[in-house]
Image (cartoon, helix red, strand yellow):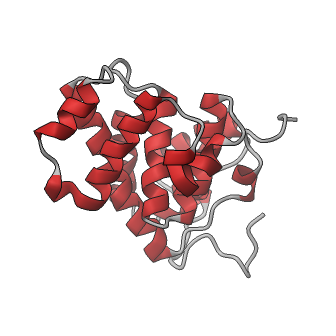
């Protein structure tokens, strides 16, 4: 649990009851589903207008129906690129979600450490090759990168999704690192041990 010795942000974290109604309602919905409030929701509520924009874009990318990416694929992109950006919060939080979606307790650690050695499919590796290039060397993206994705059944719209998720979480990683966002303790065991 978070203690004063381990604050969730270096900026003030508003009390739940002090938040605007729309933000408080969304946070309570997440709490009801997860059993706890992920610290990102509270830390970013320091700036309500930015919280709304952040959550709206997150949802547009991560909750999107259709396309060639599964929910597990999307979380895998977040874990791999957040590891490259050294973002503890996103690796831990999205690693938990990845373990749950993929039903593989080891996959998040493998992907965060070295996805090239992880127990993932060749298709997922091609997806992460593209995501990491977007993350680290987007100025080098060329037609051959799209062709490599197409060879694994991804469309150009899927490539856009991979790039958008990578870009959005690049923003998230940098903000989380800057504010010192701390992952909830609950994330560490999710998808590793049976839920009580």
Q: Nearer the viewer, residue 27 or 174?
A: 174
Q: Position of residue 131 (x, y in %)?
A: 33, 46
Q: Is residue 30 above or below residue 158?
A: below
Residue at 34% x, 60% y: name it.
171
Quadrant of res 145: top left
Q: Position of residue 176 (x, y in %)?
A: 47, 66
Q: Indicate the quadrant containing the C terminus: top left, top right, bottom left or bottom right.
A: top right
Residue at 76% x, 73% y: name it.
3
Residue at 69% x, 42% y: name it.
106
Q: Indicate the quadrant containing the N terminus: top left, top right, bottom left or bottom right.
A: bottom right
Q: Nearer the viewer, residue 180 or 156?
A: 156
Q: Residue furthest right?
A: 196
Quadrant of res 64: top left
Q: Is residue 182 above or below residue 129?
A: below
* Total labels drawn: 0
Q: Position of residue 180 (x, y in %)?
A: 53, 75
Relative placement, left or right, of 2 versus 56 is: right
Residue at 83% x, 35% y: name it.
195
Relative placement, left or right, of 35 versus 17 is: right
Q: Nearer the viewer, residue 2 or 96?
A: 96
Quadrant of res 96: top right
Residue 87 seen anywhere in this rendered image of the structure: yes
Q: Position of residue 146 (x, y in %)?
A: 19, 34
């Amino acid at each position: 649990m978070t203690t004063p010795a381990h604050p969730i942000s270096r900026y003030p974290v508003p009390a739940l009851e002090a938040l605007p109604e729309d933000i408080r309602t969304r946070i309570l919905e997440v709490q009801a589903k997860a059993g706890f409030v992920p610290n990102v929701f509270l830390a970013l509520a320091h700036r309500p207008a930015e919280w709304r924009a952040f959550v709206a874009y997150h949802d547009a990318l991560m909750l999107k129906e259709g396309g060639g990416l599964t929910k597990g694929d999307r979380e895998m992109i977040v874990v791999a690129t957040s590891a490259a950006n050294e973002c503890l919060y996103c690796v831990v939080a999205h690693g938990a979600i990845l373990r749950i979606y993929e039903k593989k307790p080891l996959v998040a650690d493998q992907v965060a450490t070295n996805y090239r050695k992880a127990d993932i499919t060749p298709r997922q590796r091609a997806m992460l090759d593209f995501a990491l290039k977007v993350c680290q060397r987007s100025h080098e993206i060329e037609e051959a990168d799209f062709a490599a994705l197409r060879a694994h059944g991804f469309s150009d719209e899927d490539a856009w999704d991979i790039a958008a998720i990578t870009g959005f979480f690049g923003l998230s990683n940098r903000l989380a690192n800057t504010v010192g966002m701390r992952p909830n303790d609950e994330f560490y065991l999710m998808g590793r041990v049976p839920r009580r």
